Amino acid sequence: MKNSNNELISTNTLNLNENKVPRLSKLIWCMLYENILLFGIIFITALVYGVVLNQKHGLHHRLGLQITIFVVLGIYFVTCWHTTGQTLAMKTWHLQLKDNISQKTQLSLTKAVVRYILGFLVWVMPSIIVSSIVNVPVLDIPLIISNIVLVFILAKLSTHKQFLHDKFLQIKFIDIK
Protein backbone atom coordinates (compact mmCIF):
# COMPACT_ATOMS: atom_id res chain seq x y z
CA MET A 1 0.00 0.00 0.00
CA LYS A 2 1.27 3.51 -0.77
CA ASN A 3 0.71 6.74 1.08
CA SER A 4 0.31 10.25 -0.37
CA ASN A 5 4.09 10.55 -0.88
CA ASN A 6 4.07 7.37 -2.96
CA GLU A 7 6.02 5.49 -0.27
CA LEU A 8 5.29 1.89 0.59
CA ILE A 9 3.50 1.37 3.89
CA SER A 10 3.43 -1.96 5.67
CA THR A 11 -0.11 -3.24 5.99
CA ASN A 12 0.89 -4.76 9.36
CA THR A 13 1.09 -1.28 10.87
CA LEU A 14 -2.35 -0.34 9.65
CA ASN A 15 -5.30 -1.48 11.69
CA LEU A 16 -8.19 0.34 10.14
CA ASN A 17 -10.85 -1.53 12.10
CA GLU A 18 -9.20 -1.12 15.50
CA ASN A 19 -11.86 1.27 16.73
CA LYS A 20 -14.69 0.26 14.42
CA VAL A 21 -17.86 -0.22 16.43
CA PRO A 22 -19.81 -3.26 15.19
CA ARG A 23 -23.46 -2.98 14.17
CA LEU A 24 -25.95 -4.01 16.82
CA SER A 25 -27.37 -6.58 14.42
CA LYS A 26 -23.95 -8.27 14.36
CA LEU A 27 -23.94 -8.30 18.17
CA ILE A 28 -27.41 -9.87 18.17
CA TRP A 29 -26.34 -12.64 15.76
CA CYS A 30 -23.21 -13.22 17.84
CA MET A 31 -25.33 -13.40 20.99
CA LEU A 32 -27.70 -15.93 19.40
CA TYR A 33 -24.77 -18.09 18.33
CA GLU A 34 -23.24 -17.74 21.81
CA ASN A 35 -26.47 -19.04 23.33
CA ILE A 36 -26.36 -22.11 21.09
CA LEU A 37 -22.82 -22.81 22.29
CA LEU A 38 -23.82 -22.15 25.91
CA PHE A 39 -26.60 -24.72 25.59
CA GLY A 40 -23.93 -27.39 25.10
CA ILE A 41 -21.91 -26.18 28.09
CA ILE A 42 -25.03 -26.06 30.28
CA PHE A 43 -26.19 -29.49 29.09
CA ILE A 44 -22.86 -31.16 29.90
CA THR A 45 -22.64 -29.33 33.25
CA ALA A 46 -26.17 -30.44 34.19
CA LEU A 47 -25.48 -34.01 33.05
CA VAL A 48 -22.31 -34.31 35.14
CA TYR A 49 -24.02 -32.62 38.10
CA GLY A 50 -27.00 -34.99 37.88
CA VAL A 51 -24.82 -38.09 37.64
CA VAL A 52 -22.50 -37.05 40.46
CA LEU A 53 -25.39 -36.23 42.83
CA ASN A 54 -27.57 -39.10 41.59
CA GLN A 55 -30.29 -36.60 40.76
CA LYS A 56 -33.57 -38.45 40.21
CA HIS A 57 -35.74 -35.42 39.45
CA GLY A 58 -34.96 -32.11 37.78
CA LEU A 59 -36.12 -30.11 40.79
CA HIS A 60 -33.93 -31.99 43.29
CA HIS A 61 -30.80 -30.01 44.14
CA ARG A 62 -32.06 -27.25 41.83
CA LEU A 63 -30.34 -24.36 43.60
CA GLY A 64 -27.03 -26.25 43.61
CA LEU A 65 -27.37 -26.89 39.89
CA GLN A 66 -28.11 -23.21 39.22
CA ILE A 67 -25.08 -22.12 41.23
CA THR A 68 -22.91 -24.71 39.48
CA ILE A 69 -24.05 -23.51 36.04
CA PHE A 70 -23.42 -19.88 37.07
CA VAL A 71 -19.87 -20.78 38.17
CA VAL A 72 -19.11 -22.90 35.07
CA LEU A 73 -20.38 -20.17 32.72
CA GLY A 74 -18.37 -17.64 34.72
CA ILE A 75 -15.22 -19.71 34.25
CA TYR A 76 -15.91 -19.96 30.50
CA PHE A 77 -16.55 -16.24 29.99
CA VAL A 78 -13.84 -14.94 32.32
CA THR A 79 -11.23 -17.28 30.82
CA CYS A 80 -12.12 -16.26 27.27
CA TRP A 81 -12.21 -12.53 27.99
CA HIS A 82 -9.02 -12.64 30.05
CA THR A 83 -6.94 -14.72 27.63
CA THR A 84 -8.05 -13.48 24.18
CA GLY A 85 -10.78 -10.90 24.70
CA GLN A 86 -13.11 -13.17 22.71
CA THR A 87 -15.51 -16.02 23.32
CA LEU A 88 -15.92 -18.73 20.68
CA ALA A 89 -18.92 -16.94 19.16
CA MET A 90 -17.04 -13.63 19.13
CA LYS A 91 -14.19 -15.29 17.21
CA THR A 92 -16.68 -16.59 14.65
CA TRP A 93 -18.27 -13.16 14.21
CA HIS A 94 -14.89 -11.32 14.28
CA LEU A 95 -15.67 -9.35 17.41
CA GLN A 96 -13.36 -8.57 20.28
CA LEU A 97 -13.50 -6.69 23.55
CA LYS A 98 -11.17 -3.77 24.08
CA ASP A 99 -10.40 -2.05 27.36
CA ASN A 100 -10.63 1.69 26.75
CA ILE A 101 -8.26 2.44 29.62
CA SER A 102 -5.38 0.02 28.95
CA GLN A 103 -6.10 -0.23 25.19
CA LYS A 104 -5.59 -4.00 25.46
CA THR A 105 -7.88 -6.57 23.91
CA GLN A 106 -7.44 -8.96 26.84
CA LEU A 107 -9.32 -7.87 29.93
CA SER A 108 -7.64 -8.01 33.31
CA LEU A 109 -8.86 -10.87 35.48
CA THR A 110 -10.62 -8.47 37.83
CA LYS A 111 -12.34 -6.62 34.99
CA ALA A 112 -13.42 -9.90 33.37
CA VAL A 113 -14.97 -11.15 36.64
CA VAL A 114 -16.71 -7.82 37.28
CA ARG A 115 -17.99 -7.79 33.67
CA TYR A 116 -19.47 -11.26 34.14
CA ILE A 117 -21.21 -10.31 37.39
CA LEU A 118 -22.48 -6.98 36.03
CA GLY A 119 -23.61 -8.72 32.83
CA PHE A 120 -25.63 -11.14 34.95
CA LEU A 121 -27.16 -8.23 36.86
CA VAL A 122 -28.06 -6.39 33.63
CA TRP A 123 -29.12 -9.29 31.37
CA VAL A 124 -30.62 -11.85 33.76
CA MET A 125 -31.49 -10.42 37.16
CA PRO A 126 -34.25 -7.97 36.11
CA SER A 127 -36.21 -10.84 34.54
CA ILE A 128 -35.79 -12.98 37.66
CA ILE A 129 -36.95 -10.15 39.95
CA VAL A 130 -40.00 -9.22 37.86
CA SER A 131 -40.88 -12.89 37.36
CA SER A 132 -40.82 -13.54 41.10
CA ILE A 133 -42.99 -10.47 41.74
CA VAL A 134 -45.55 -11.24 39.01
CA ASN A 135 -45.41 -14.99 39.71
CA VAL A 136 -47.06 -15.96 36.41
CA PRO A 137 -44.91 -18.70 34.78
CA VAL A 138 -46.45 -18.05 31.36
CA LEU A 139 -44.84 -14.59 31.38
CA ASP A 140 -41.26 -15.78 32.09
CA ILE A 141 -40.14 -16.00 28.45
CA PRO A 142 -41.77 -12.68 27.41
CA LEU A 143 -40.11 -11.02 30.43
CA ILE A 144 -36.69 -12.34 29.40
CA ILE A 145 -37.20 -11.24 25.79
CA SER A 146 -38.43 -7.79 26.82
CA ASN A 147 -35.40 -7.36 29.09
CA ILE A 148 -33.04 -8.30 26.24
CA VAL A 149 -34.82 -5.88 23.90
CA LEU A 150 -34.59 -3.12 26.52
CA VAL A 151 -30.83 -3.71 26.96
CA PHE A 152 -30.32 -3.50 23.18
CA ILE A 153 -32.45 -0.33 22.93
CA LEU A 154 -30.34 1.29 25.65
CA ALA A 155 -27.18 0.23 23.78
CA LYS A 156 -28.57 1.66 20.54
CA LEU A 157 -29.23 4.98 22.28
CA SER A 158 -25.75 5.01 23.82
CA THR A 159 -23.15 7.24 22.15
CA HIS A 160 -20.76 4.37 21.35
CA LYS A 161 -23.42 1.64 21.17
CA GLN A 162 -22.21 0.13 24.45
CA PHE A 163 -24.11 -2.04 26.87
CA LEU A 164 -24.56 -0.59 30.36
CA HIS A 165 -22.05 -2.88 32.05
CA ASP A 166 -19.46 -2.24 29.33
CA LYS A 167 -19.95 1.51 29.56
CA PHE A 168 -19.45 1.35 33.33
CA LEU A 169 -16.25 -0.72 32.95
CA GLN A 170 -15.04 1.34 29.95
CA ILE A 171 -14.97 -1.66 27.63
CA LYS A 172 -16.10 -1.68 24.02
CA PHE A 173 -16.70 -4.20 21.27
CA ILE A 174 -14.52 -3.79 18.20
CA ASP A 175 -15.02 -5.29 14.78
CA ILE A 176 -11.76 -7.01 13.82
CA LYS A 177 -12.65 -8.02 10.28
Image (spheres, grey):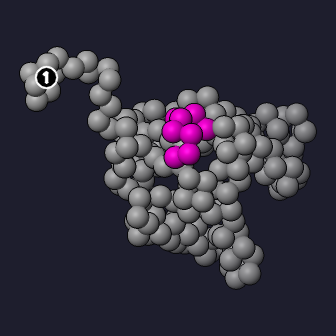
- Assign the magenta stretch its main secondary structure: loop
Residue in the image at 13% along x and 22% along y: 2
- The image quadrant of residue 40 is top right
Q: Residues within 10 Å of mark 1 (few under 14, many from 20)?
A: few
Q: Is residue 177 above or below residue 70?
A: above
Q: Position of residue 32 (x, y in %)?
A: 47, 49
Q: Is residue 144 covered in magenta?
A: no
For residue 67, say whether it is visible: yes
Q: Is residue 17 above or below residue 131?
A: above
Q: Position of residue 124 (x, y in %)?
A: 65, 62
Residue in the image at 60% along x and 59% along y: 168
Q: Which residue is mark 1?
A: 2
Q: Is residue 102 covered in magenta?
A: yes
The reply, left or right, for residue 52 in relation to residue 15 is right
Which portion, as a residue range, is magenta?
A: 100-107
Residue in the image at 25% along x and 18% along y: 10
For residue 86, say whether it is visible: no
